[in-house]
Image (tube, helix red, strand yellow):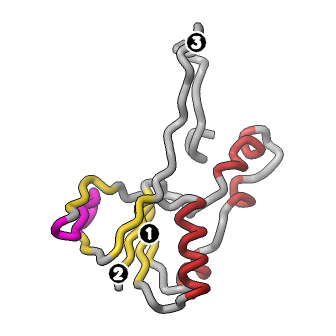
Amino acid sequence: MRLVIIGNGLAATRLIESLTDLAPGRYAITVIGDEQMPAYNRIQLSPVLGGEKESAAIRLHDEAWYQQRGVTVLSGERVLAVECAARMLRTDKRLMGWDELVFATGSQPFVPPIPGSGLPHVFTFRTLDDV
């Protein structure tokens, strides 16, 4: 059974951990993330920004971990469309089918509408690229 997970963050990683521990081999898992780097713990972005941690220290798993579990990781790829009736999705690089689909895309930072929030030196961070 083909399982595609859109999003390659903490939620997707925990799902992969659970499924591959509880039902190894049941799913052919593909995880799609639009960032170039492997999954990492976004909660730890502040210590990376503050220089207390290196970005490599917040990485969740290495490539070998995914390979051992038979998981295909598509990094740097954005999902553009999902066609539920056809069970197909289109990324900026390919068209692929799925039997089960999970959206694990997280959220976008919210900036409250307070005076000064639109100034050029005010920004949010959600990714390692932002940091």
Report the amino acid beneath label 1: Val
Which comes before the other along the chain, label 3 or label 2? 2
Residue at the image point whose x is 60% and y is 69% from the top = 14
Q: Secondary structure at mark 2?
A: strand
Q: Secondary structure at mark 3?
A: loop
The residue sitting at the right extreme is 52
Q: Are marks 2 and 1 in contact (CB under 8 Å)?
A: no
Q: Secondary structure at mark 1?
A: strand
Foreground mark, 1 or 3, reads 3
Which comes before the other along the chain, label 1 or label 3? 1
Is residue 76 magenta-colored? no
According to the image, label 1 marks what residue? Answer: 31
State the separation of the CA atoms marked 3 and 2. 46 Å
Label 3 neighbourhood size at 10 Å, few (<14), some (14-19), many (20+)?
Answer: few
Where, quadrant-wise, is the C terminus in this rendering? Answer: top right
State the separation of the CA atoms marked 1 and 3. 37 Å
Image coordinates for residue 95, horizontal then vertical, percent: 22, 67
Front-most of residues 75 and 17: 17
Is residue 87 magenta-colored? yes
On screen, 28 above or below 130? below
On screen, 88 above or below 35? below
Image coordinates for residue 71, horizontal then vertical, percent: 48, 80
Front-most of residues 44 and 16: 16
Foreground mark, 2 or 1, reads 2
On screen, 129 above or below 105? above
Q: Quadrant of residue 102?
A: bottom left
- The span shown in magenta is 85-95
Image coordinates for residue 73, horizontal then vertical, percent: 46, 71
According to the image, label 2 marks what residue? Answer: 2
Q: Which mark is residue 114?
A: 3
Report the amino acid beneath label 2: Arg
